[in-house]
């Protein structure tokens, strides 16, 4: 099996490369990354040591892909993953669209020309923000919780948001680029018979994730708490009750192994949610309590000013993946937090290394 991973030096790309190479040492793995994210360069040497062929390049430039030969599958883990990208003044809207959508076009053309399969790692942020905000919630145990009494939007229950939930705008520029990438991938599947699997991922987290509040929130929070850097509960009356679910790359990889082996399966759904779900979700306030117990008490300030695109409760329902693929997450939330904590203790300069 020959696999090309884009964004191979990012947290998800490098994690998947290590997992695949460990499980299948005879498979031929290549990767491309533009190393634009601070800290990503630290993954180049370890991946090379495992036998992963690395090329410095940018998927926005189709010519940077020409040097790769035939591959069986391309796993797309390259994207600017911040929901604030394109509107926060740090990156332009054009850069975001060129990277996340223009890059997808180049990758799909690469797959079409080489008859390779395409696995797109998408996101929970393709779901409609107004619809997400309208989910009935109540406060319980220092977290927002689904209110089973009040009527809920279509595609949502106490088990989370399903694939049928609204994707109507606004979903953020970032979400729009990922939703458009999904649509293009499916069109290439139908028009050119490119094998395509699309995985809408919840929050991914684990040791070695580059901590940034707009991206790797769990890794950022643990590192900042451990080393007494300022932390804020933003919006939602400064309670920190906003909830996210968490998934480890090892669990994502378990589904990818099945998808890599199912090239010609026409019965499986092309698109599924892949997330930690209700059994692996936590609020920022609950995360702080965990950190207080693990590292000692560290006060968190309240910032009452809301931010655009923030949502109170984002938990994905992955029952379709369970039904069709027999997949469910195995790593517990606590085991993921402990893994990040140990990494933080062993790498005291981690936030500075990956500072944006």
Image (cartoon, grey):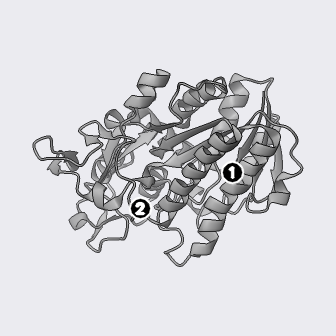
- In terms of secondary structure, where does tag 2 sit? loop
Q: Hey, which residue is sitting farthest left in the picture? A: 149
Q: Are marks 1 and 2 in contact (CB under 8 Å)?
A: no
Q: Is residue 329 visible?
A: no
Give the residue pinned by disc 2: 171
- In terms of secondary structure, where does tag 1 sit? loop
Q: Hey, which residue is sitting farthest top in the picture? A: 326
On screen, residue 128 above or below 91: above
| Coordinates of residue 326 in the picture (x, y in percent) | 46, 20
On screen, residue 117 above or below 241: above
**At 59% across and 57% down in the image, what residue appears?**
349
Of residues 146 and 166, which is closer to you in this image?
166
**At 71% across and 42% down in the image, what residue appears?**
192
| Coordinates of residue 208 in the picture (x, y in percent) | 59, 46
Give the residue pinned by disc 1: 7
Label 1 or label 2, whichever comes before in sequence order: 1
| Coordinates of residue 309 in the picture (x, y in percent) | 37, 65
Snapshot quadrant of residue 40: bottom right
Q: Quadrant of the N terminus?
A: top right
Q: CA distance from mark 1 to mark 2?
A: 23 Å
Q: Hey, which residue is sitting farthest front in the picture? A: 191
**At 30% across and 43% down in the image, what residue appears?**
155
Q: Nearer the viewer, mark 1 or mark 2?
A: 2
| Coordinates of residue 84 in the picture (x, y in percent) | 47, 68
**At 34% across and 44% down in the image, what residue appears?**
315
């Amino acid at each position: 099996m020959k696999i090309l991973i884009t964004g191979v030096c990012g947290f998800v790309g490098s994690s998947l490369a290590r997992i695949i190479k460990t499980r299948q040492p005879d498979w031929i793995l290549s990767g491309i990354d533009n190393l634009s994210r601070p800290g990503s360069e630290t993954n180049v040497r370890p991946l090379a040591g495992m036998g992963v062929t690395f090329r410095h390049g940018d998927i926005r430039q189709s010519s940077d892909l020409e040097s790769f030969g035939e591959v069986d599958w391309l796993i797309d883990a390259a994207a600017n993953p911040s929901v604030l990208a394109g509107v926060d003044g740090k990156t332009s809207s054009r850069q975001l669209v060129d990277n996340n959508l223009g890059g997808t076009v180049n990758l799909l053309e690469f797959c079409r020309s080489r008859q390779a399969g395409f696995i797109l790692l998408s996101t929970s942020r393709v779901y409609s923000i107004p619809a997400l905000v309208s989910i009935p919630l109540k406060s319980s145990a220092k977290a927002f919780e689904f209110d089973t009494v009040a009527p809920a939007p279509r595609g949502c229950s106490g088990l989370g948001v399903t694939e049928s939930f609204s994707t109507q705008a606004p979903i953020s520029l970032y979400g729009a680029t990922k939703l458009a990438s999904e649509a293009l991938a499916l069109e290439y599947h139908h028009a050119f018979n490119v094998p395509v699997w699309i995985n809408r991922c919840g929050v991914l987290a684990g040791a070695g994730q580059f901590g940034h509040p707009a991206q790797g929130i769990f890794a950022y929070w643990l590192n900042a708490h451990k080393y007494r850097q300022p932390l804020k509960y933003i919006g939602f009356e400064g309670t920190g009750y906003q909830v996210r679910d968490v998934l480890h790359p090892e669990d994502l990889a378990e589904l990818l192994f099945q998808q890599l082996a199912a090239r010609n399966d026409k019965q499986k759904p092309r698109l599924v949610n892949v997330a930690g779900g209700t059994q692996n979700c936590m609020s920022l306030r609950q995360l702080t309590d965990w950190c207080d117990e693990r590292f000692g008490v560290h006060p968190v300030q309240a910032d009452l000013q809301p931010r655009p695109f923030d949502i109170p409760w984002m938990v994905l329902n992955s029952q379709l993946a369970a039904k069709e693929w027999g997949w469910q997450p195995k790593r517990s939330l606590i085991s993921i937090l402990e893994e990040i904590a140990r990494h933080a203790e062993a790498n005291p300069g981690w936030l500075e290394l990956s500072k944006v």
